[in-house]
Amino acid sequence: MKISRLFAVSVSVIIAVGLTLSSGCSASSRRKPTPAEQYVRSKGYRVLSAEGQVMAFTIGTETLVKLPYIQYWAVQTVDPTPFWGKEATVEKFVVNRHPLDHFQTGIGKLATRALGRTDVWVLSVNGAPVAGWSFPVTDNRLTGGVYGLNGENWEDVHPGEDFQEWRAAWERRFSVPPTPKISP
């Protein structure tokens, strides 16, 4: 009798745990990915965590030439002019299968190594992804600018250019609203 009671309790616990786990899995699998998440997945990255919207701002002088925004734009290939005055949202994801998953700098005890995952941010305008940047998740605190969505550094995006000259030209260009093009 003790064995059958123990068996019944064990089976009940197993069923309860199974139902709890399966209901949790089905709830998360029913979540519809945002366009930003679909964009990240389309690049071949596996999304480990979708952390949601982390920032919202209007694209303009402040968000093009001031820190930290200029760092984000410095690693983009998209021209922000068409988005001037528009609301932008930024969603954050933690991914793997990204080039920065294998990041390493320094040697020996001073080395900083990636932990096999990368933080990725996607900037969207009107719900459509238009830009993004990334930064490796590392074992020690890492400082400096961000990388492009696919791990590009500033030199990759602007080969042969001088950073100070690029920055001065960028600031001149975006310190005032762009002149609208008038069709004849």
Image: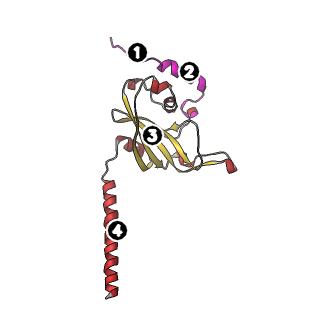
Write the start and end of the magenta stretch as one range: 155-184
Residue that label 3 marks: 121
Question: Could you tell me which secondary element the residue under label 2 belongs to?
Answer: helix
Specify which label sits upstream in the sequence, 1 or 3: 3
Residue that label 1 marks: 179
Q: Quadrant of the N terminus?
A: bottom left
Q: Residue at x 31, y 66 (%)?
A: 19
Q: Which residue in the rendered view is the most extreme toward the right?
A: 108
Q: Amino acid at mark 1?
A: Thr
Q: How far is mark 4 from mark 3, CA to CA?
A: 35 Å
Q: How far is mark 4 from mark 2, CA to CA?
A: 61 Å
Residue that label 2 marks: 168
Q: Position of residue 24 (x, y in %)?
A: 33, 59
Specify which label sits upstream in the sequence, 4 or 2: 4
Q: Nearer the viewer, mark 1 or mark 3?
A: 3
Q: Nearer the viewer, mark 4 or mark 1?
A: 4
Specify which label sits upstream in the sequence, 4 or 3: 4
Question: Could you tell me which secondary element the residue under label 3 belongs to?
Answer: strand
Specify which label sits upstream in the sequence, 2 or 1: 2
* Residue 148 belongs to magenta span: no
Could you tell me if the residues under marks 4 and 2 are in contact, i.e. CB atoms within 8 Å? no
Q: Amino acid at mark 3?
A: Trp
Compare residues 108 and 55 and report the one nearer the observer.
Answer: 55
Compare residues 137 and 36 and report the one nearer the observer.
Answer: 137
Q: Position of residue 38 (x, y in %)?
A: 37, 44
Specify which label sits upstream in the sequence, 3 or 2: 3
Task: Residue 43: tell me if it is visible.
Answer: no
Q: Amino acid at mark 2?
A: Ala
Q: Position of residue 92 (x, y in %)?
A: 43, 42
Q: Position of residue 148 (x, y in %)?
A: 50, 37
